[in-house]
Amino acid sequence: MRSIVARSAGVLDRKMGDQDGSEADVMGMIAEYAFAKQYNTFPDLGLTPRSGSADGRLKGYRYDIKATKYIDGRLLATRKHNPDVDIYVLCIVDGSEVDIKGYATKEELIHPGNLKDLGHGKGYSLSQSELREFK
């Protein structure tokens, strides 16, 4: 429903992979819910059109969950500037199981040295070994 509302309001789908948009939306919602449950926060379940913005807050930091189905997946972000996010979180989703791999601050991820083209246009990318662990 969130995707339908966003697309009807003219918000572009800026996913970075070749997966179906609805598949990416479902995977993202599963990851957002799992992260919020793990860290006792509440996910943004609103159905208002939005472009950018954060998925939630944790200890005062606005976070954006990035989900992938690939075990060796990377933390990816588009080149679009998002002033509403402080940290980016990578989650690996396998069905209903979610593995929270780590995070990077906006400054660590959104950096010219991290621009890469992984086959779907240039975007920011960090490997899992470059991510911070949650304490």
Image (spheres, rainbow, N blue to C red):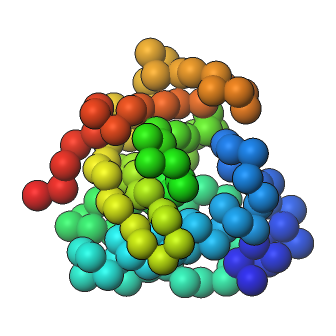
Q: Is residue 121 visible?
A: yes
Q: How many labels does the image show?
A: 0
**15 lies above or below 59:** above
The residue positioned 40% from the left and 52% from the top of the image is 90
For the C terminus, which image quadrant? bottom left
Q: Quadrant of residue 64?
A: bottom left
Return the residue found at the far top. Answer: 113
Identify the residue at the far left of this view.
135
Q: Which of 104 and 90 is in front in this view?
A: 90
Q: Residue 103 at what x, y percent from top left? A: 31, 48
Apparent side of residue 132 relative to residue 127 in the rendered image (left or right): left
**Quadrant in which the N terminus appears:** bottom right
Q: Residue at x 33, y 60 (%)?
A: 100
Q: Which residue is drawn at 71% across and 27% down?
A: 119
Q: Where is residue 107 in the image (x, y as percent from the top left)?
A: 35, 33
Which of the two residues, 121 or 109, is positioned nearer the viewer here? 121
**Residue drawn at (48%, 77%), measured in percent from left and top?**
96
Residue 40: image location, x then y, percent: 25, 82
Considering depth in this image, is 13 or 20 the residue closer to the camera? 20
Would residue 50 be visible to someone looking at this image? no
Percent across and percent down for residue 121 are 72, 27
Tell me if residue 45 comes above or below residue 125 in the rendering.
below
Q: Where is residue 77, by image quadrant? A: top right
Q: In this view, does 102 lie above or below 72?
A: below
Foreground of the two, 115 or 51: 115
